[in-house]
Amino acid sequence: MAFIIKKDKSYTWPATISEPMDGGAFTVHKVRVKFKMLSQGRIDEVIRNEAEEDADILTDVLIGWDDGAFKDESGADLVFNEENKDLILSVPFVRGALIKGFFESISGKALKRKN
């Protein structure tokens, strides 16, 4: 079967969020998010520019998540929109889990970046 090159490619990918808890433990949350595939040129640019913030990269590539992946304090689903995307990307351990998931998805392994 031939590999089909698509101009606009996106895909759903799992991410594991480790939420810090009192006493030095973590609660693990598994979510599925939707990423937009970047061109190799843009990926190369991100890798070379270690000053580029993870939030900026995720603002570009995070284009959705499964229903129920994120909830507000009352337990209601956070639907995907720009306001809710900004909200979840403001949480450091969520942002870290999503950027890790994105780079693992495109490289098959974790990418080592300084920021």
Image (cartoon, helix red, strand yellow):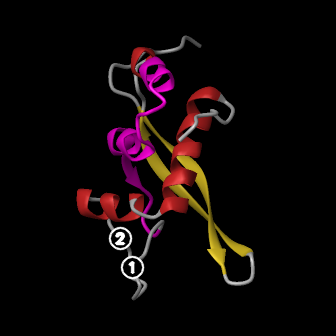
Q: SS at mark 1?
A: loop
Q: Residue at x 70, y 72 (%)?
A: 26
Q: Residue at x 42, y 30 (%)?
A: 37
> What's under tag 2, amino acid-wise?
Leu
Q: Residue at x 52, y 55 (%)?
A: 32
Q: Residue at x 53, y 40 (%)?
A: 102
> What's under tag 1, amino acid-wise?
Asp
Image location of residue 106, percent across then percent down: 56, 29
Query: Quick one: quadrant of the N terminus?
Result: top right
Q: Residue 78 carries which label?
A: 2
Image location of residue 19, percent across then percent down: 61, 70
Q: In this view, does 109 lie to the left or right of 11?
A: right
**How many numbered marks appear?**
2
Question: Which quadrant would residue 68 be assigned to in this image?
Answer: bottom left
Q: Which residue lies furthest to the right in this view?
A: 24
Q: SS at mark 2?
A: loop
Q: In this view, does 87 lie above or below 95?
A: below
Which stretch is magenta? 43-68
